[in-house]
Amino acid sequence: MKFSEKTKLSPGMWVIVCPLCGSTIASASDKEFLPDYSICDCDRNGNKLPVFEVYNAAGVQTIRRNKYPRFSAKITFDGDASDLEDVVVLDEEATPEVLAKALRKAGEFLIKKSNG
């Protein structure tokens, strides 16, 4: 995915930061000198990340999808049922239909993971 959000860190320091891993992937002294977009090493096909990852972040169980459309969401439990809340979509160009399908697959992944 192409990352293009430019952030000003200080006077004379502009950066493009990877939203997945938090590393600086481009920097320049002026916003106009930054490239139109950058691609982080954590997002390249050679890394072969699993499609879904479940991890704990600050005591909250979270699921992340590493394949388009990428997202992360908090997993909440209510008795035997679980739900995904606070979904953060990382691929802004994803259509609602594609995102809904990916969220259903995340639910199926969680069911398989809890049964096996």
Image (cartoon, rainbow, N blue to C red):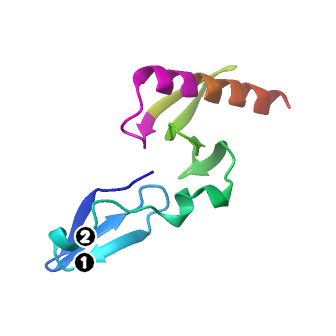
- Please, is residue 89 above or below residue 46 in the view? above
Q: Is residue 91 magenta?
A: yes
- Image quadrant holding the C terminus, namely top right
- Please, is residue 114 above or below residue 16 in the view? above
Task: Give the amino acid type for the residue marked by disc 2 in the picture.
Answer: Leu
Q: Are discs 1 and 2 less than 8 Å apart at CB?
A: yes
Q: Which mark is residue 79?
A: none
Q: Residue furthest left?
A: 11
Horizontal and vertical percent for residue 23? 44, 69
Q: Mark 1 points at which residue?
A: 28
Q: Residue furthest right?
A: 116
Q: Name the residue under label 2.
A: 34
Q: What stretch is highlighted in magenta?
A: 87-103
- Image position of 6 (left or right of 30): right
Task: Give the amino acid type for the residue marked by disc 1 in the picture.
Answer: Ala
CA distance separating discs 1 and 2: 6 Å
Horizontal and vertical percent for residue 53? 65, 45
- Image position of 18 (left or right of 79): left
- Please identify the quarter of the rendering in which residue 37 is found: bottom left
Along the polypeptide, which appears first: circle 1 or circle 2? 1
Q: Does the magenta stretch include residue 64?
A: no
Closer to us: 57 or 87: 87
Circle 1 Cα neighbour tier, 10 Å, few/some/many (<14 / 14–19 / ≥20): some
